[in-house]
Image (cartoon, helix red, strand yellow):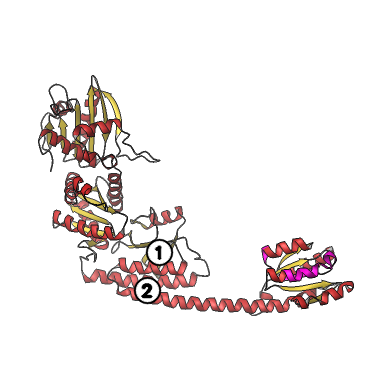
Amino acid sequence: MSSNEAVSLHVMAIVGEQSTMELMNSVFTGAGDDLVLATDLAEGLARAAAEVPEVVFIDVSLGNGAGLALVHHLRAVSPEVSVFALAHESSTELGSQVTALGGEGVLMHPLTGDELLMAVSAVRRRRAEQRELIRLERQAAEVRQGAELAVQIADAADAKDRSSAGQAVVNVFTQATRATTAMVYVPAGEGSTQLMRVAERGDVGQAPSFCAEMELHNHARANGLEVIPLALKSKMSGLVVLEGTESTGEQLAPLLRMLAAQSAMMLSLVHEREHSDSGAMKDPRSSAYTFAYFVDVAGREIDKSRRHKRRFALATLVLEGERDSDIEQAATDVADKVLKIVRDTDVLARVDQGEFYLLLPETGGAGGHALRRRVTRQTGSAEDRRAAPPGPELTMGVATFPHDGSDLSRLLRVAKHRADASRASVVRRLALDRQSLEEVVDMLLWHDADPGGDEPLLEAPRSIELPVMDFMTVAVAAVGEAIRGGETHIIVTERPGMSVGTAVRASLGREPEGFRAVDVSRVPGCADIDALCLIAEHGAYVIVGRLDRDVVRAVHACDPLLADLMIQRLGEAAGKRLID
């Protein structure tokens, strides 16, 4: 800052004469200063306390000489303020006392513009020097901070993978901007247009873990987030997404550009090492693979399945609990158990502390659901969970290619939704896994199974009441739709006379592989139960009710957990194993 004129001041004038007000306004507004005018002492003191001026001109003759006392009060309110007295010849003695009270000086009426500007020139010079000193100190602090943060980025170049490196970038940007939430996204693989979230801090809310770049920008705009590219020239190494920053404006822009460029270079180096070290990078916390490796394998599987018109399944496994240490231990146990169940060609990857993705090549929906049942059994039965102390809870969702989507981000979203739906399943909410067949059916019929909310789950049970023939028609239609999708397991109840079993058997004309009929009519409390359970390529479906003369009161749902439970209870009642 090279000149006094470059500094504008916050000036207050407490005067009573109109001509003096006009002169003050002309001089200080013309000089680019901020001027506040007060016409009496009370107003002047109140505004000085609220607005903290740098310079005050006060007519000491106001209030029969009370203006002199205001000089002392102003200094008490703002010790840094510079006070000038304005005096007439009749109040010269009052004006001379201003300096004794800490004032800068006295200006005699009639005033001139040059006198006013000369009076504040020393104040302007001091303010310029103070502001320049503050600017230099801030600049030095930014240089020191930039150097410290640059060292952190450089140290992260030794990270094992982009997840660890991304966490260092998150730490650096939260320190620089004081952001409450920060996320780092990087390209999923060589030439990939998809981004994956590899690190975060704070509450990420509904931020996608895997998405296209445009989808991420749309999410950021909708939620007021700031996106900072990590790029060197035209090569992008990732994106930083920030929320709740104290400042990312022009003041921080040079620092953030420097950090972004260094982060881009560091992430690029780590990626190159990831790519060259080993084709199958392992997560250091478990025996699962890393997300980056999973994305590469999944991309190849999608290409192969498209070319050869094959199917594959993808599952998400989510652990939720209150303590990170419990989740960490449970995640290790889940990974070990899942790897003992799956084939060598299946790929289990750890995405987050309590989240895994599982790729099942050449596996359809029915196979994916079979695996889900095996994983559920291996990770603890209902009795085991009740006997053990409360701990992280595992939920699993399955999606299939191409039925549920033809790109990885869509498949992951569907699988994640189904895992969330399983967490909210009526089986869990009503503790149906503790009930007998008779009790399960009655609880479904007489309790509100739908959790409600703004967006009720599509998988939640819905109550229906239909004439017997219409009930049979619904069941037969569901079977026909399931069979058109491919491999299907059909479990029905059958008893003497008309039942779901006889209706479905008649519609099929034969008993396909996967068809099972059971008679539970002799089981106490189950004589009037009719049920159909389907495990199909596109999902699971169950419809179950009680016959009341010519009407069936029932519920139906696309809930895999409920379908599994009904199949288990029907098999137990009939003394048969209905499905693996």
Q: Position of residue 152 (x, y in %)?
A: 38, 74
Looking at the rendered image, the quarter that the N terminus falls into is bottom right
Q: In this rendering, would 88 be left or right of 570?
A: right
Measure how far apart labels 2 and 1 are at the Cα level: 14 Å
Instruction: Please give the name of the residue rendered at 74% of the width and 73% of the height, measured from the top-left corner.
Output: 83
Write down the region rendered in magenta: 50-73
Determine if the magenta segment contains residue 60. Answer: yes
Q: Amino acid at mark 1?
A: Val
Q: Position of residue 577 (x, y in %)?
A: 10, 39
* Extreme residue toward the top, this view: 549
Mark 2, secondary structure of its residue: helix
Report how many numbered discs are placed on residues in the image.
Answer: 2
Instruction: Identify the residue position indicated by label 2 in the image.
Output: 153
Within 10 Å of the Cα at label 1, are there few (<14), some (14-19), or many (20+) other Cα atoms? many
Mark 1, secondary structure of its residue: strand
Determine if the magenta segment contains residue 374. Answer: no
Instruction: Identify the residue position indicated by label 1 in the image.
Output: 240
Compare marks 2 and 1 and give the one earlier in the sequence: 2
Q: In this rendering, would 236 be left or right of 254?
A: left
